Amino acid sequence: MESDNPLLKRAYALDGDAGRIRDLYADWAASYDADTLDGMGYVAPVLAARALSEALEGETAEARILDAGCGTGLVGAEIARRTEAEIDGIDLSPGMLEEAARKKVYRSLAEADMAATLNLSDNSYDGVVSVGVFTSGHVGPEAIDELARVARPGAPLVVTVHEKVWEPDRYAAHLAEMERHGLIRLRAINDAPYHEKEGYTCKLCLLEAA
């Protein structure tokens, strides 16, 4: 199905160009939370934060978490409600990072292009989460390789993939290939609500860094 929401239409019409993505989110940052949470019924941040918190199995007091594509900090805020973990956030949009900083739940925030190699060390994080990134015109499945690289062996990775791109962009095949190459272990891939008021779903993927 296709949403009539003009904000989503603009977002899903992106073609991966970093400049266009920055422009969209510069315009959208201030109203993003209200537009998505109240206007669209955006539940993916809560579901992903819950999945990551449960996967950490109580090892949260000293855990370091990467929120990749953190946006305005919706996921980070949910993780902070559930854990005592230290959370770092990265995002392409300076405007979104400014909004995330207002939530005061991040240890650090930095601008980063997830379509490129991340300026982060191997095996740096006890958990990684990425919500709202793997969708039309944003970032492709290859970016999950970088998330696995920066996660410590055994660390959980929770990733949402929008229903519109799961099959066309061959996410299932890419994850299977990552597992064959010893980069991850697949723990669960479940259908989950995404924008409830728009009728969109996602694949909620629980992976483990190998």
Image (cartoon, helix red, strand yellow):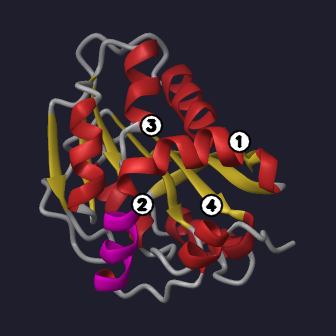
Q: CA distance from mark 2 to mark 3?
A: 14 Å
Label 2 Cα crowd, 10 Å radius (few <14 / some 14-19 / many 20+): some
SS class, disc 4: strand
Dot 2 falls on a residue whose secondary structure is helix
Q: Dot 2 corresponds to which residue?
A: 28
Q: Which residue is mark 1?
A: 41
Q: Is residue 16 above or below residue 64?
A: below
What residue is drawn where x is 35% and y is 15%? 60
Amino acid under disc 4: Val
Q: Residue at the spot x=49%, y=22% of the render?
A: 53
Along the horizontal axis of the image, is 127 left or right of 172? left
- N-term-proximal mark, 2 vs 3: 2
Give the mark toward the camera: 4 or 2: 2
| Observer-nearest of 80 and 210 | 80
Of callouts 3 and 1, the N-terminal one: 1
Write down the region rendered in magenta: 19-27
| Labels 3 & 1 near each other (Cβ < 8 A) | no
Element assignment for label 3 = helix
Q: Locate residue 146: give its quadrant.
A: bottom left
Q: Nearer the viewer, mark 2 or mark 3?
A: 2
Q: Mark 1: which amino acid?
A: Gly
Per the image, the residue denoted by label 3 is 74
Q: Residue at x 48, y 54 (%)?
A: 184
Q: Could you give the CA–CA distance between mark 1 and mark 4, rounded to whole angstroms? A: 17 Å
- Per the rendering, the mark at residue 161 is 4
